[in-house]
Amino acid sequence: MIQVQREDSTWKDVFDKTEMEVAIMASTRKKYTSAFQTPLMQPPLVQTFGHLGTGRAADMVLDGSNEPPTVMDQYTTRLIQHHKRPDSILQHGLHPLILPVET
């Protein structure tokens, strides 16, 4: 049994296997696609930062050397500025992006 929240915010107990699968898939889809409509996932920012945010532009954000595009709203601009890597982390050295796997 699972509980599913209805559109009117009430809860429904679901016992049917097929209905449970449909509800779980819908919940999972909603959870993992919620960022698709955010500014960083829309043109032109998605072309700049990519879907994973691991490229040169992301490194520039972390370094604090990124010049925000003028197309960004004030909240996205502030979010990016907030993600500058703190000096305290730089003092301890950066960790490698790829960690060795021990056999």
Image (cartoon, helix red, strand yellow):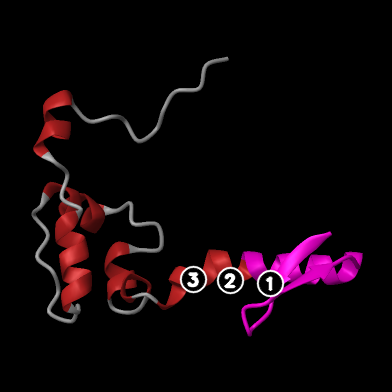
Residue 35 in the figure: left or right of residue 80: right
Name the residue: 21% across, 63% down. 79
Determine crowd level at label 2: few under 14, some 14-19, many 20+ residues with C-alpha closer than 10 A.
few
> On the image, numbered disc 3 is attached to which residue?
34
Q: State the CA–CA distance, disc 2 to disc 3.
A: 6 Å
* Image mark for residue 26: 1
Mark 3: secondary structure: helix
The percent position of residue 75, horizontal first and vertical second, equals 20, 73
User: Type of residue at label 1?
Assistant: Ala
Q: Are marks 2 and 3 in contact (CB under 8 Å)?
A: yes
Q: Earlier in the sequence, mark 3 or mark 1?
A: 1
User: Type of residue at label 2?
Assistant: Lys
Mark 1: secondary structure: helix
User: Type of residue at label 3?
Assistant: Ser
- The residue at the far front in this view is 10
Name the residue: 40% across, 57% down. 52
Q: Nearer the viewer, residue 44 or 2?
A: 2
Name the residue: 31% across, 76% down. 39
Residue 2 in the figure: left or right of residue 37: right
The percent position of residue 46, horizontal first and vertical second, equals 34, 71
Q: State the CA–CA distance, disc 3 to disc 1.
A: 12 Å
Is residue 98 located in the magenta-colored stretch of the structure?
no
**For the magenta stretch, what is the residue range?**
1-28
Determine crowd level at label 1: few under 14, some 14-19, many 20+ residues with C-alpha closer than 10 A.
few
Looking at the rendered image, the quarter that the C terminus falls into is top right
